[in-house]
Each structure stands twice: as C-alpha cells, then as structure tokens.
Amino acid sequence: MGSQSLLVLPAPTMMIPSKIAASSLAPPRPGPLCFPRALTITDSVVFRVKSNSARNKLASSIRCALTPALKTTLDKVVTSHKVVLFMKGTKDFPQCGFSQTVVQILKSLNVPFESVNILENELLRQGLKEYSSWPTFPQLYIDGEFFGGCDITVEAYKSGELQEQVEKAMCS
C-alpha cells in the first residue's frame, strides 16, 4: 500500500452576506478589501488521497469554481473601484515577489488601489482564474477591465501605457 495524505478542500457552499450588495452602493473605503470575509465557507471537505496523481485530478475538478454568485460579486468588486489588484498577500504585506512588484509599481505612480488577498480563499482563487481567463496572480483590473499580470504590468509601466490607463481611469 502507498502512503496516504489528506487534502482538505473548502466545501462548495458559500454564503454571500447582504452587506456586499449594500457596500457596493457606498463609496469605496480606503484599505484592503475584506473579500475573504464576504465569501465565507460553511464547511470543509476532507478527502483521502493516495497519490499525487489523484490529488492533481481532485484539484483540477474544483477549477469550475466560478459560480454565478461569485461572478456577480467579482463584477461588483472590479467595477466599484478604479484599480483593483488580486494578489498573494496584501499591499502592505505582499507574500509573493510578483505581487510585490506590481504593488511597488502602483505605489510609485501614487495610484490609489484596492487589494484582495487570494490566499485566504481557494474558491475565490480558482474562480478568478476562470473570471479573467488568466491562470496566475497577481491580476490587475483597471476601470473594471482585466489589465494583466506582473509581466504585462511591468512592460506597460516601462512603456508609459500603464500611466496612461490609470490616468484615463481616474478621470472617468
């Protein structure tokens, strides 16, 4: 018999509090979004997985995480703020070099932006990959539209395109 390991995945049931709908009407507040609190997982599911192959199959089965409710919530988040960065960690404490690079670029441009820590919610993380059709993080949204990841942001910063996009968004 091979060794067994446990893989704990969040249950697919999510509750989206009514305060999300109300907060989308209010003006944006400073500081990072508390997105993981908005999407709370009611339970955990424990799977016994016998191999890495089985673990990979199981992980790929949760890739259909973009529920209609999550899509609606993401639509509200990206349209209620001019600049939103879905990242690993927070803008005050990035937990990935790529996320840190994008944060530094936005801060160097004095761009006010909201950050969402995707590490706190696996369904959010998987759902965002489908929402943007982009497999990696960070993911930058400007004026409600997906702009790109770290490499695209760096290139756009170097060419001046990022500054133009941000200025255009701030004036609209």
Image: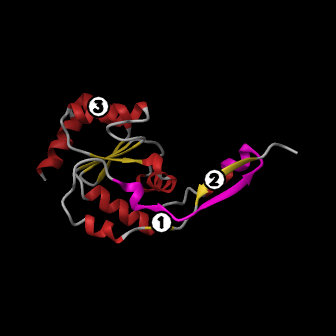
Q: Amino acid at mark 2?
A: Val
Image quadrant in which you'd find residue 29: bottom left
Task: Evaluate if marks 3 and 1 touch, with contact meaning CB atoms under 8 Å apart.
Answer: no
Q: Residue furthest right?
A: 1
Which disc number belongs to residue 8? 2
Q: Is residue 140 above or below residue 70?
A: above
Residue 139 drawn at (x, y percent): 38, 44
Determine whether 133 is above or below 158 in the image. Answer: below
Q: Earlier in the sequence, mark 2 or mark 3?
A: 2
Of circles 2 and 1, the one toward us is 2
Q: Is residue 14 left or right of residue 1?
A: left
Q: Foreground: 165 or 25?
A: 25
Task: Give the residue displayed 30% in from the left and 62% down from the top.
Answer: 76
| Helix, strand or loop at mark 1 | loop
Query: Is 136 covered by the magenta stretch?
Result: no
Q: Mark 1 = which residue? A: 67
Disc 3 versus disc 1: nearer the observer: 3
Q: Which residue is mark 3?
A: 104
Task: Write down the region rendered in magenta.
Answer: 34-56
Residue visible at 48% across and 53% down in the picture: 121
Q: Residue furthest top?
A: 158
Q: Residue at x 40, y 63 (%)?
A: 71
